[in-house]
């Protein structure tokens, strides 16, 4: 088991372009989370999946953002019509359950720069 | 809404010395969990230590221990015998008992001097 992986690690895009990030959780984990981390801040919750169902979306996730987890395995996060304010590190995490022993394991993140 | 405050943007410690990182939180829930995460430069975040709010005993993990003061809503991290590899950004995080999302503080950047 190689842990949570994210692709790409870095993405530079021009304002107005669409971007898509991928997250592969630890294989047996049924819960998957997306967080956003801007410079000088801690990660902020964006959305959460249990298997393929998206159970909660933060107010931070505007209509330009969409996340999917089609088969309850990997997840994608798409940002349409990117803005400079979208520049951040996008972190994915997964867990086996919700209890205290089911900690969230984080991936290395995708750093997005919008020029 | 729950909030987590880390009042020390940066801290430094000499190798082999002890350092304490501060964290306070605000919540109206009685059942919750607290965590310290470590984020080394350009590397992924890893869990350092966790504490269940219903447990009075402070959690310890090798050189890492916490001072959990529930009434004061304080959750500090003590690192003993600091090592160069401890240098990282440390985040305090909160999770409600019936919740799943983590609420993080802004972090404390720890430098370990040889």
Image (cartoon, rainbow, N blue to C red):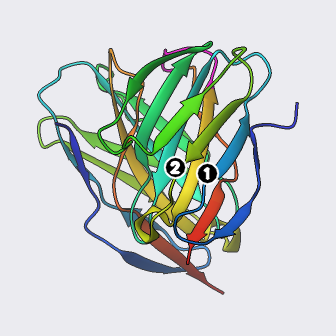
Instruction: Chain letter for mark 1, please.
Output: B
Q: Check contact, mark 1 vs mark 2: CB within 8 A.
A: yes
Instruction: Chain letter for mark 2, please.
Output: B
Does residue B87 show up magenta in the picture?
Answer: no
Q: Residue at x 61, y 73 (%)?
A: B16
Q: Residues within 10 Å of mark 2 (few under 14, many from 20)?
A: some
Does residue A96 show up magenta in the picture?
Answer: yes
Q: Residues within 10 Å of mark 1 (few under 14, many from 20)?
A: many
Q: Are marks 1 and 2 on the same chain?
A: yes
Q: Which percent across, then down, holds residue A55?
A: 43, 17
Disc on the earlier residue, 1 or 2:
2
Q: Which residues are magenta?
A: A95-100
Residue at image mark 2: B37
* Residue A65 vertical placement versus A52 (above, below): below
* Residue B1 vertical placement versus A15 (above, below): above
Q: Which mark is residue B45?
A: 1
Q: Residue at x 50, y 60 (%)?
A: A82
Q: Which percent across, then down, holds residue B96?
A: 30, 25
Asked which quadrant contains residue A12, the reply is bottom right
Residue B42 showing in the rendered view: no
């Amino acid at each position: 088991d190689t842990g949570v992986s994210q692709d790409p690690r870095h993405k530079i895009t021009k304002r107005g372009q669409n971007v898509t990030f991928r997250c592969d959780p630890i294989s047996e984990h049924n819960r998957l989370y997306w967080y956003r981390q801007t410079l000088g801040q801690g990660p902020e919750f964006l959305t959460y999946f249990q298997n393929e169902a998206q159970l909660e979306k933060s107010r931070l996730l505007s209509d330009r953002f969409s996340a999917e987890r089609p088969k309850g395995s990997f997840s994608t996060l798409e940002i349409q019509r990117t803005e400079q304010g979208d520049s951040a590190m996008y972190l994915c995490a997964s867990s086996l359950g919700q209890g205290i022993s089911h900690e969230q394991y984080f991936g290395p993140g995708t750093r997005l720069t919008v020029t | 809404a729950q909030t987590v405050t880390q009042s020390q943007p940066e801290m430094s410690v000499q190798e082999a010395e002890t350092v304490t990182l501060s964290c306070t939180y605000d919540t109206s829930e009685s059942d919750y969990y607290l965590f310290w995460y470590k984020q080394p430069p350009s590397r992924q975040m890893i869990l350092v230590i966790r504490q269940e709010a219903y447990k009075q005993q402070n959690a310890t993990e090798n050189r890492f221990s916490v001072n959990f003061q529930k009434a004061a809503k304080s959750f500090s991290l003590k690192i003993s015998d600091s090592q160069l590899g401890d240098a990282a950004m440390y985040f305090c995080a909160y999770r409600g008992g019936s919740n799943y999302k983590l609420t993080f503080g802004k972090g404390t950047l720890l430098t370990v001097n040889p």
